[in-house]
Image: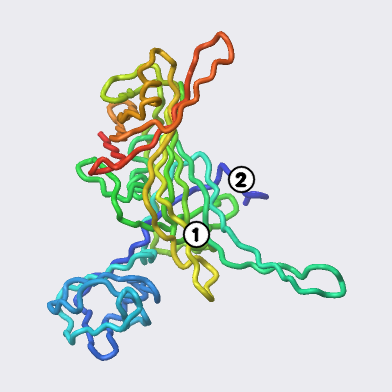
Amino acid sequence: MSCFANGSAVQLFYVRELSTLAATTISADETGSTFADSANSFITSGKFAVGHIIEVSGFAEEENNGKFKIATVAAGAITVTDVNGNAVTLVDEVAGDPITITQEGGIPANPLFKPIRFVSEGLTPNVTQIESQEINPSRQRPPSRGGNYSVAGEIAGEMSFASHDDLIEAALQGTWTTDVLVVGSIDRTFAVLERHTDIGVDYIYRGCKVGSMALAAPLGEKAGITFNMLGKSAAEYTVPVGATFGTATTSDMMVTTNGSFTEGGDPIAYATEWNATIDNGMEASFALFNREAYCISNGVAVVNGTMNAYLKDGALWAKVLNEAETSHIIVLEEGADSYTIEIPKVRYTQGQKQVAGPGAVIPQYTWSGGYDGTTSMRITRS
């Protein structure tokens, strides 16, 4: 065992916090608004927990299907309310039909952890400190106490094909459909596992969402991708016996000497840098008598970025002066694989054009991406 943890021995994995139990042993009971399982698998297989939202399907009686909130849970019984905590009435129905219960926010019983390729990561608890204001003869402050806390931090990586597609999907809150992804409103959570393989210590970060995603295409460099994560809690972790670990992709990093940039429908060969961020406006929300975050609330997706380009003529600068609408299409390539990032509705909100000497004049443009009736960002993989 190493004498101290070394960054080269850190491995990152994630699993979608989504537990599903499908069985023919589940019944519904009007008394107590209860779902019962004669196989007693709600905890061992379903990993269901109090306070989580479940979605039930498969019952013949429609009142027993839909979304509910878990009020109590035992191996063989779950009592439920509606999603707001109000009383709900189920209909008596015997077991026999195939019933599926899905829970957002739970680690599966036998998780398949997928690897994250990264160059740096900094997930950590954010703890507010509660300071005493008590006056005492010693003229010294008593120790502070930890208050509410959440998890925050960045995972930065190099763009490579198919390496981060789940997290990109979560950032846009859409779904890859025929290899096309647009901004949506599907709120996904992950458990991120940090393994210090040299000292044999594992940590789990729960309830993690992609608060924002930044894409960077610097001149003559590798393309970068950074996920800003927000989560509910952090703890030491014992990997379940039934857990399995996926294999990382081996695709090469994408570099900005390959690809293309189209601005306003015209190829542009004189840009020197391009950056984009989609920010979901998330924040940690807290509740009384709970230390960890109650949830990570969602917000409005905002797309913006910056671009540097040589002052070749007056065309781009005119769009700044006239607040003209344009578009950006960036293609990142590596061999036969590519990502096409499209911002369909762009306006330059600010431009900086400084002349500091006899060298090239390279203005910086700040841009904002708007909703075009379908999306404010589209990513296509091929």
* Picture quadrant of residue 368: top left
Query: Given the image, on which type of amino acid does mark 1 rest?
Result: Ile
**Residue at horizontal 67 percent and vertical 69 percent from the top:** 145
Q: Residue furthest bottom?
A: 31
Precedes in sequence: disc 2 or disc 1? 2
Q: Residues within 10 Å of mark 1 (few under 14, many from 20)?
A: many
> Residue 319 at what x, y percent from top left?
36, 25
**Residue at horizontal 37 percent and vertical 82 percent from the top:** 74
**Are the residues tagged 2 and 1 within 8 Å (C-beta)?**
no
Q: Which residue is mark 2?
A: 6
Q: How many numbered marks have been drawn onto this rendered protein structure?
A: 2
Query: Given the image, on which type of amino acid does mark 2 rest?
Result: Asn
218 in relation to 137, above or below: above
Q: Foreground: 291 or 122?
A: 291
> Residue 320 at what x, y percent from top left?
40, 26
**Residue at horizontal 43 percent and vertical 52 percent from the top:** 281
* Picture quadrant of residue 240: bottom left
Q: Could you say which disc has been placed on residue 204 in the image?
A: 1
Q: Residues within 10 Å of mark 2 (few under 14, many from 20)?
A: few
Q: Secondary structure at mark 1?
A: strand
Q: Is residue 221 something that shows in the picture? A: no
Q: Is residue 228 something that shows in the picture? A: yes
238 in relation to 118, above or below: below
* Picture quadrant of residue 316: top left
> Residue 105 at what x, y percent from top left?
38, 65
Residue 120 relative to residue 16: left or right: right
CA distance for labels 2 and 1: 18 Å
Q: Secondary structure at mark 2?
A: loop
Residue 305 relative to residue 86: left or right: right
